[in-house]
Amino acid sequence: MSFSDFKIETFHGDDGAEIRYVDVGSGKVMLYIMGFGSSIESQAPFIEAMQEKGRIIAFDQRAFGMTPAFGEMGIHQSARDAKAFFKLLKLEEVTLFGYSMGAAVIFSFVNQFGTDGLSGIILGDMSPKLINEGDWKLGLYQGWYTREMFNKDLELIHTDYKRFALMVAEGLLFKNYPENVRDFSGTAEEIRKRILDKRNDLIAQALIQGMVDIGEEHAKANYYYWETMAGSDFRDVLSKIDVPTIILYADPGSGYCPATAEYMESQIPGAVRIPIYGCTHMAAAESPAQWRGCIVEFAYNEKG
């Protein structure tokens, strides 16, 4: 099966938004909330693998993939769109899986709606607070992302989007440790060359295509996704997660460090963290068998 074989459905939100989604497989239900720049098309291999184990629902967030930009956009609206599927499809006992930005959507979901209707949560390589400030050093780029950088990024999204997106891509693609000095210098062309000189595999190419080489509508919408994701602090939400939870994280990581997952485990009652060793933030593609196996065992209660 390929992306073209999926039956694409359309859900009309209360505000008139047309949300494209797929609902495939049968049995226990997992609602998959994708990361920054991801779409049903880019995640088709994962969706196909999951539908062989159970039922998976996945949707293109507003301005991503096949879903047009419309109305309010950002992680808080994505959480509301996710909640709408519970009513639309009469869902109960759902496992919510969020990877990267998708995990931030889950934090917002729990903050807005609690955990009623959920049987479990899977958080994939994310931090509850991306900006590192004060005594908080467990955010983006393993402690290097500051509020000054956040404010500059919001400007760059409007003035030099490709440079912004390439800096993010570089920060996610290479194994790192908190003490390593990060390089945020260069023009968009220089950063792209720096990335591809060090890593020109299909994973790097796919990330650049999904985050950088995109249309104007998508690029403009990413302002709202970045503002709501990177500008939020969900640390106080973690204690409200009262359903079984696993935290999948990359070790040594790139975007986030293992200590971030340790912190989240300490704050979420009964949570279990599972390392994906030798990986960057792109662990789902770098170690797909282990990544998918953990998800299948938790969401569908069977070995991957």
Image (cartoon, grey):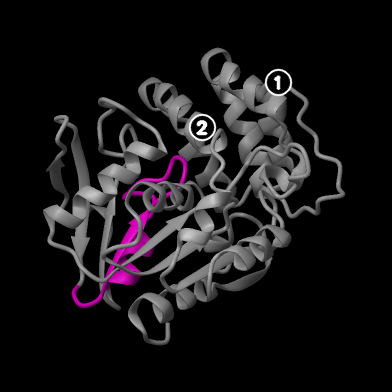
- Closer to the N terminus: mark 2 or mark 1? 1
Q: Which residue is mark 2?
A: 226
On screen, residue 200 above or below 161:
below
Give the residues in magenta.
26-51
Would residue 20 appear left or right of 88 to someone viewing this image? right
Q: Distance from label 2 to label 1 (Cα)?
A: 20 Å
Amino acid at dot 2: Trp
Circles 2 and 1, Cβ within 8 Å, touching? The answer is no
In which quarter of the view is residue 296 placed? bottom left
- Residue 301: image location, x then y, percent: 36, 84
Q: Quadrant of residue 187?
A: top right
In percent of the image, x 29 and y 43: which residue is there? Answer: 80
- Which residue, as the protein is rendered here, is positioned at the far top? 159
- Look at the image and tell me in which quarter the C terminus lies: bottom left
- Percent position of residue 109, x then y: 37, 50
Residue 35 located within the stretch drawn in magenta: yes
Badge 1: residue crowd in 10 Å (few <14, some 14–19, many ≥20): some
Answer yes or no: is residue 6 visible.
no
Residue 260 location (% of width, % of height): 68, 57
